[in-house]
Amino acid sequence: MKLLDMYAKLKGDITQIEKELERSVTFEHKLLSEASLHLLKAGGKRLRPVFVLLAGKFGRYNLEVMKKIAVPLELIHMASLVHDDVIDDAATRRGQPTVKAKWDNRVAMYTGDYIFGRALVIATELGNPQIHQVLSKAIVQMSIGEMEQIRYFFNTEQTIRHYLLRIRRKTALLIAVSCQLGAIAADGDRETANRLYEYGYNVGMAFQIRDDLLDLFGTEKQIGKPPGSDIRQGNITLPVILALQDEATRERLLVEIARIREHNGNVDTREAIDLIKNSKGIHVAEQLAAKYVEKALAALKELPSLPAKKNLSDIAHFVGKRNY
């Protein structure tokens, strides 16, 4: 309920960002515009723009300035999803056909590139070179994270460290810079921006761990895609790594993963999912997500007691318990 109240208070600003997102991808090239809008209209929580807006409250808040950060960050996230769906051969996202499913891989790849380009064009409207440097480095790290995920597909020997580094690049970093850049764009002080970055990083880590748990426990309606999609695609997530470290499940799970790989994911994965869900690893993964939430909350402690601080705390608690 707290989260719904926060969204209600930000509704006017979020509505303006939604309109700006739509304008930003509407272009003279009909197919690029249509494919971009298809993804945009599928919806989303718009967490990254929300983080930008809330972080901006710790400085001189100006919606026109905030939009030039919030919109590019959401576009970068959207572009990465389009590319992800090509790599993962995903048919649905948020309950809707993916761009690659509705058109094809070539259209999807160029759509993702186009959305990335539009993000950078909008960001250049702000004259602060630090903003451009942070955004560029984030895109580079995200790309490395995506390549690392591909490199480790079906690799059952990867460690927890490999996984954490990968999700840092793929997910946590963009959430961290959303918080950081919101403060920087609002002329907040460096210490505040750094604390917000730390908060966003830890929230992002918890978010991805919970997301990987939801892939096993959630319904298709909850998560917008078939449960078990990760293991079907060869993405060995934290719950799987931990289940492989459990002597009670390791050997049987190795057999199931080998079978899934042999058939390119086109097999029933219920046995593998049941093994993972019944292993000791689920509890450990949940504990780690909770630890990241605690670190996020600790990063907020020294910030000024503004309503935005309470909102960020509520989001962290939501992320730690989310089921959608």
Image (cartoon, rainbow, N blue to C red):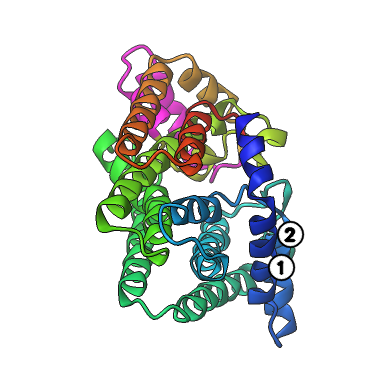
Determine whether, in the image, residue 131 is placed left or right of residue 51. Answer: left
Name the residue at the top extreme: 248
Residue 259 in sight: no
Determine whether 14 is above or below 305 in the image: below
Contact between labelled residues 1 and 2, with CB atoms less than 8 Å apart = yes
Q: Amino acid at mark 1?
A: Leu
Left or right placement of residue 150 versus residue 42 in this view: left
Q: Nearer the viewer, residue 292 or 94?
A: 292
Among the 4 quarters of the image, the one containing residue 142: bottom left
Q: Secondary structure at mark 2?
A: helix
Question: Which residue is pictured at 32% across the width and 77% down the height?
Answer: 129
Measured Cα–Cα span from mark 2 to mark 1: 6 Å
- Tell me where residue 125 appears, x and y as whole percent: 48, 81
The image shows residue 37 at horizontal and vertical percentages of: 71, 68
Image quadrant in which the C terminus is located: top right
Secondary structure found at label 1? helix
State the mark number for residue 41: 2
The magenta stretch is: 238-266
Q: Is residue 321 placed above or below 100 in the rendered structure?
A: above
Residue at image point 52% right, 75% down: 113
Is residue 70 shown above or below 322? below
Say which residue label 1 marks: 37
Name the residue type under label 2: Lys
Residue in the picture at 31% in, 67% down: 137
